[in-house]
Amino acid sequence: MNVKESNELISHVSETLDAQINKRGLLESQLFPVTAYICVSFYNAYDILYDILKQVAEKATPEKMGEESRKILSELNCLTINYIPLYYMEGRMGEIHRMGGDPSKVSKKKREETLFILDFWKRLASAYYPGNELFVSDLGGNYPAIDTDDINWTLNQVQEIKQDEVKNIKRVMANLEVIAFLDECEARAKLCDHGPYRINDEETLVFREIMHLYDGGKPHFPWSETKAKAPHSNIAFAFRLKNVKAKFDDFASMDTEPKTFTDRITGVVLLKREGDKIIPMDLDILDEYNEYAKNAQKELYIKFSQWDRKQKLIAGAYAYSYGYARYTNFVGITDQIDWDLSERTMNKYIPEFMETDFDPGITRHFRTERKKRKEGPSLYLMAED
């Protein structure tokens, strides 16, 4: 990829992130300094991502990774694929902003690394999405993450259910979402929604997937181990919906019309992944998942509430950075990577964000359209020289 191609890509990525960030706003939590640790993680990604992806690329091509990730309960999905342009390019934007907004001050080595990263991401995303698109938003809010064979197989597993069963399923799913969210320091990295897959004029199929629950094996994070254990580390809820419109965003979250669709669920199947196999589960397993979710929530909340701001900053930034383990897991090298925050992050950005929640570079996303036309994309184009 040359500089001209990269700048065309940066412009598109920048417009996409502008829209998403303006829609969601800055993130707040009473438990974690979420915006602050996200900013720290961006700078850390700018330090570490090139070395990680370089090692991944030695084991598998981005095209192979994209094509083979079109499956149920895949670690690489629209959210985790977006980690590359979101985390790294935000860190790059922040660094350039601190250099007076002049991309020509970026070192030659860093420019070459950025070209490699953008090329890797474009090849990965275009192999994953239909039509060689790069974002769910490029597909108009449709997120077809799986192919026809998997859709048809899932539909053959769907069970008819009663309304009282639907309410219980949604209650358990909500509790699992809370523990998945909490374990990620109040981020949605373990969650993925996709669809809608049209069945007929009235019905569609949608998925909500939850991954990396603690089942007694190796904990996802150092703090993830709890006395409570899930019956399995992942679960997918596939819902057959009647007369529901569903749209998806670039963070793998679903918005529906009507907002509440409990009474429009006509069938469901619970699925789990074991290696290369997807296995249907009995609805009775929900009681075990629910018991785990409720007890693990209590354990983690007590643990986190005893941490100080520095511990929470480091943990949150670590959790975001460990998102790249989805790539290293694909090629089996996760245990060979040092996932600790970089020395520069620890010495410069942890102390800085102990005092503030806000990075000045973020303001670029909130400029007027007129200012963007005058000053250029939020993420800064690469210097031509």
Image: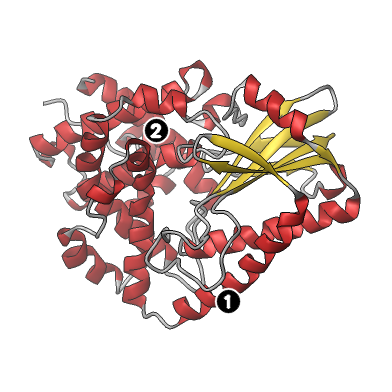
Which mark is nearer the camera, 1 or 2? 1
Most foreground residue, 131 or 20: 131
Cα separation, mark 1 vs mark 2, equals 39 Å
Quarter of the picture holding the N terminus: top left
Quarter of the picture holding the C terminus: top left
Look at the image and tell me whether residue 358 can be seen: no
Most foreground residue, 122 or 178: 178
Check disc 2: other Cα within 10 Å, few if <14, some if 14-19, many if 20+: many
The residue that disc 2 covers is 13
Q: How is the image coloured?
A: secondary structure
Residue at image coords 27%, 50%: 335
Res 298 label:
1
**Residue occupying the far top of the picture:** 131
Q: Position of residue 15 (x, y in %)?
A: 43, 34
Q: Position of residue 148 (x, y in %)?
A: 64, 20
Q: From the viewer's perspective, tell me whether residue 79 is left or right of residue 140.
A: left
Q: Position of residue 367 (x, y in %)?
A: 41, 45
Check disc 1: other Cα within 10 Å, few if <14, some if 14-19, many if 20+: few
Residue at image coords 66%, 36%: 247
Location of residue 346 (image quadrant): bottom left
Q: From the viewer's perspective, tell me whether residue 47 is left or right of residue 60.
A: left
Q: Amino acid at mark 2?
A: Val
Q: Which of disc 2 and disc 1 is earlier in sequence?
A: 2
Q: Position of residue 21 (x, y in %)?
A: 48, 47
Q: Are marks 1 and 2 in contact (CB under 8 Å)?
A: no
For residue 288, above or below residue 263: below
Q: From the viewer's perspective, tell me whether residue 303 is left or right of residue 161.
A: left
Look at the image and tell me whether residue 363 can be seen: yes
Location of residue 249 (image quadrant): top right
Q: Amino acid at mark 1?
A: Lys
**Residue occupying the far bottom of the picture:** 306
